Image (cartoon, helix red, strand yellow):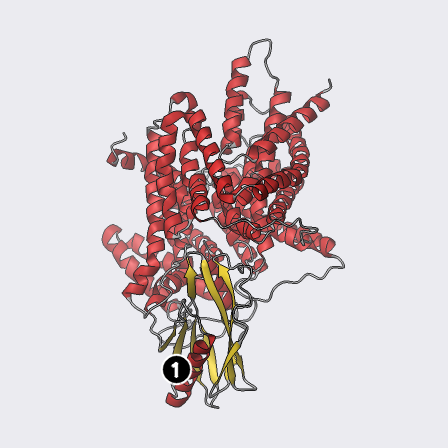
């Protein structure tokens, strides 16, 4: 899911703690801040910290002065050969090619398993907004190719396109049948996306809170942090990529439920909106001397069901007879692009 | 003349005036409205007193026209006010692809969709449900500001650290942008503490005291950047179709409505924050939705906040426009509410119709003159506006703001961090420890 959805989910989960509402009414925003922060923290750990310390076996860094697609193809082929020959997991970093303050050389890497080839095509120069610069589309018309030693299996359609800011990491994992499993962004949703790490973080912060303010604050911090961190892991599990739920007990990502892609508009919006409604309900329950009264069902009808039906009807009316095309998403690709686009 | 025609003429005049003013970089509609308020107050109890039937629709029209058309300087001249900040990058992308007209018109369609949403969906429900939400949320506004600050700071991702082996050097390279973002936020926050506690601006224009800082933080750095680095703007191609459909409009309304609605309803949460939230609530795979969502968000932020003042039984004042009206007039029930809603609808239609010719005029201007020169002229206009409204002291504040606003430009961090100027001092004040900080700073 997108960062904002995770963040709002965290705040919503925090609002279920009566202590959070009580503290907020007394001017203390701590638990809500903790909730939101822990809701987004697993992605923060990955994208802001861990990836810069993640070691790679091969770094592909094309020369900005003379970008050479054949060099990239050869290096990718060499990496695959390394994984096949040494029968071990190999990590490859495809670096971006910065040509100037606002210009980047775009390139794409594709695998042709029928011909056992990797193909690299240098595309146009793009600006930081990923808009091609006119006249640069055909600067490198040739497609560089190199033979690869094994088939590369992509379990999802992550486009191996490199352009602005950082380039992606690819992991090649040898399979028993000799093929290689391609893992996009292997540093993402690894140990950070686990319920156990959330619990450990809760214990650590709880211990500090215990020293500072006593037992009540300690367990309240623990519950808030563990629950809000955990909701991120649970939400990510609804997508395709999954998470390493019980690290260090589990070593690999558990595949997700495939209910959605992390960049899909509707699930993200619904998450944010339902979170807002849940926060509202919890604040209502914690508000003394209310002159207005309503039930949870009433709130959901007015806030979710009726607007949802109206929206659905309107969408149907407006789109009758038209083909609505929504770009297909991919969990890793969506989150990777979000990290680059969130300016 | 019947009240109907008086209202219609007033709202039309206000809309046309602000639509034209919106094309001038650096000038904010609230500056003009502030001057008008002073004029109206001066004429009170004289033979030339201006009745509320005239100034209420006129000012509604001004806010609507501004909310719709301030996209033009943001997208075509690169001089956004804070609420239009998020339209600049995608807008300039359109401009550099020769599609500036399309970019501004997509935002305008978003504004029109926002008007429909506000008048046809929000307005009928508002008198019934907003007083309930107000009762529930009172006492909780402060932490909403804090979580917005938290999200704003946490959701900025590093942009460096792209090459080289893993390790601290790479980490530091990546974090330079984030550290610059944090520095921007806290420096802007300190400036905010100073301006809100001991503003050096003359008390006669006290309601404008934050304006020069905003201009310095947001508009001037864009102008300078354009002057230094602007490439030649390619020939602009008029679009035959905007390639939008009902689905794009609906999805823009849901994201922009959420972002703009939060910005309109919660105090101090500005249009820029609304734009950020709208952007984050949008499926990013379709850029049209992002741009149109910004149009919706901006419209709902300005006009929705103004409308809240008139919602019967709510008694909520949000946004500069509402505060200025409150100095002149106390809304009186449903009659005023319906008049304002009608004015919003009429003004939205007029301003949307004005969008196309005014965009063409500005595009012709850009076509004729070098973009660097256009930016230089825009900067000159901005400086003249600041000096005219707030004097040399205001210009000094704008320069300080520019220094802070240039940090994100130089380091590539998020410009929205400059909003620390309002968010930090107000959040501290609302949580009850603002005075401690002003004490540390020697301001109180």
Residue A138, picture quadrant: bottom right
Rendered location of residue B124, percent (x, y): 65, 38
Q: Position of residue A193 (x, y in %)?
A: 41, 67
Query: Is B320 above or below relative to A90?
Result: above
On the image, which quarter does residue B336 sit in? top right
Where is residue A208? Give x, y as percent: 26, 56
Q: Is residue B375 visible?
A: yes
- Residue B388, how many percent across, how many down? 45, 25
In the image, residue B409 sits, relative to residue A144, either above or below, namely above
Q: Is residue A174 above or below residue B173?
A: below
Q: Is residue A182 left or right of residue B290?
A: left
At 46% from the left and 88% from the top, the residue drawn is A149
- Quadrant where the image shows the C terminus of chain B: top left
Q: Is residue B405 left or right of residue B359?
A: left
Residue at figure coordinates x 39%, y 34% from the top left: B398
Viewer-nearest residue: A274 or B379 = B379
Please state the total of marks drawn on the protein image.
1
Q: Nearer the viewer, residue A285 or A211?
A: A211
Which quadrant: the N terminus of chain B? top right
Q: Element type at marker 1?
A: loop
The residue drawn where x is 62% and y is 17% is B51
Q: Which residue is mark 1?
A: A89
Q: Residue furthest left?
A: A211
Residue B311 visible in this rendered orientation of the protein: no
Q: Residue at x 37, y 58 (%)?
A: A225
Using a 10 Å C-alpha cutoff, classify the residue at mark 1 as few (fewer than 14 neighbours), some (14 to 19) or many (20 or more): some
Pick whichever, A123 or B26, lies toward us: A123
Name the residue furthest right: A321
Which chain is mark 1 on?
A: A
């Amino acid at each position: 899911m997108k960062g904002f959805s995770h963040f709002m989910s965290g705040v919503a989960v925090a609002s279920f703690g009566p202590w959070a509402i009580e503290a907020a009414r007394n001017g203390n925003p701590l638990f809500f801040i903790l909730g939101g922060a822990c809701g987004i923290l697993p992605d923060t750990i990955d994208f802001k910290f861990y990836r810069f310390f993640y070691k790679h076996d091969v770094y592909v860094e094309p020369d900005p002065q003379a970008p050479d697609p054949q060099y990239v193809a050869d290096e990718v082929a060499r990496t695959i050969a390394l994984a096949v020959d040494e029968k071990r997991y190999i990590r490859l970093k495809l670096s971006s090619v910065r040509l100037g303050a606002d210009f980047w050389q775009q390139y794409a890497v594709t695998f042709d398993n029928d011909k056992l080839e990797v193909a690299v095509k240098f595309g146009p120069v793009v600006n930081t907004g990923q808009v091609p610069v006119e006249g640069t589309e055909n600067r490198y018309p040739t497609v560089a190719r190199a033979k690869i030693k094994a088939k590369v299996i992509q379990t999802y359609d992550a486009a191996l396109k490199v352009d602005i800011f950082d380039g992606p990491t690819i992991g090649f994992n040898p399979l028993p049948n000799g093929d290689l499993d391609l893992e996009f962004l292997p540093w993402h949703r690894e140990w950070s996306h686990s319920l156990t790490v959330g619990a450990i973080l809760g214990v650590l912060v709880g211990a500090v809170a215990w020293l500072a303010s006593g037992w009540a604050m300690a367990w309240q911090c623990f519950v808030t942090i563990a629950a809000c961190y955990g909701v991120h892991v649970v939400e990510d599990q609804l997508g395709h990529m999954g998470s390493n739920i019980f690290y260090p007990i589990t070593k690999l990502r558990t595949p997700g439920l495939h209910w959605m892609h992390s960049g899909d508009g509707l699930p993200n919006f619904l998450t944010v909106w339902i979170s807002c409604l849940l926060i509202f309900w919890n604040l209502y329950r914690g508000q003394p001397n209310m002159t207005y009264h309503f039930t949870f069902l009433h709130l959901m009808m007015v806030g979710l069901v009726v607007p949802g039906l109206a929206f659905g009807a309107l969408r149907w009316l407006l789109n009758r007879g038209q083909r609505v095309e929504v770009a297909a998403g991919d969990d890793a690709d969506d989150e990777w692009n979000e990290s680059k686009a969130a300016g | 003349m019947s009240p109907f025609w008086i209202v219609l003429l007033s709202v039309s005049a206000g809309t046309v005036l602000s639509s034209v003013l919106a094309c001038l970089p650096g000038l904010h509609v609230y500056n003009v409205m502030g001057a008008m308020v002073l004029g109206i107050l001066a004429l009170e109890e004289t033979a030339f007193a201006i009745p509320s039937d005239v100034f209420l629709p006129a000012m509604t029209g001004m806010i609507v026209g501004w909310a719709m058309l301030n996209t033009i300087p943001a997208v075509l001249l690169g001089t956004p006010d804070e609420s239009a900040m998020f339209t600049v990058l995608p807008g300039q992308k359109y401009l550099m692809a020769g599609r500036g007209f399309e970019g501004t018109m997509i935002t305008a369609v978003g504004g029109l969709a926002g008007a429909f949403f506000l008048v046809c969906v929000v307005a009928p429900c508002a008198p019934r449900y907003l007083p309930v939400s107000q009762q529930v949320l009172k006492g909780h506004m402060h932490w909403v500001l804090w979580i917005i600050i938290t999200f704003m700071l946490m959701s900025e991702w590093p942009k460096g650290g792209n090459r080289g082996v893993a390790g601290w050097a790479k980490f530091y390279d990546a974090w330079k942008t984030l550290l610059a973002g944090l520095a921007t936020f806290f420096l802007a926050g300190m400036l905010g503490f100073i301006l809100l506690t001991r503003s050096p601006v003359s008390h006669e224009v006290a309601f404008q005291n934050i304006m020069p800082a905003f201009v310095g933080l947001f508009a001037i750095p864009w102008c300078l950047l354009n002057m230094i680095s602007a490439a030649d703007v390619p020939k602009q191609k008029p679009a035959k179709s905007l390639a939008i459909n009902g689905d794009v409009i609906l999805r823009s309304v849901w994201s922009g409505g959420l972002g703009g609605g939060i910005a309109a309803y919660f105090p101090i949460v500005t249009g820029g924050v609304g734009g950020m939230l709208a952007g984050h609530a949008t499926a990013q795979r379709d850029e049209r939705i992002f741009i149109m969502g910004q149009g919706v968000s901006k419209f709902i932020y300005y006009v929705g906040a103004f409308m809240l003042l008139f919602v019967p039984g709510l008694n909520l004042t949000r946004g500069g426009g509402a505060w200025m009206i409150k100095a002149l007039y106390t809304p009186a029930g449903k009659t005023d509410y319906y008049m304002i809603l009608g004015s919003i609808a009429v003004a939205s239609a007029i301003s949307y119709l004005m969008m196309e010719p005014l965009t063409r005029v500005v595009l012709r201007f850009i076509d004729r003159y070098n973009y660097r020169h256009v930016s230089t002229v825009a900067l000159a206009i901005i400086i003249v506006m600041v000096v005219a409204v707030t004097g040399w002291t205001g210009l000094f504040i704008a320069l300080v703001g520019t220094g802070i606003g240039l940090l994100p430009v130089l380091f590539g961090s998020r410009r929205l961090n400059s909003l620390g100027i309002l968010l930090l001092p107000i959040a501290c004040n609302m949580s009850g420890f603002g005075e401690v900080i002003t004490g540390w700073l020697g301001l109180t």
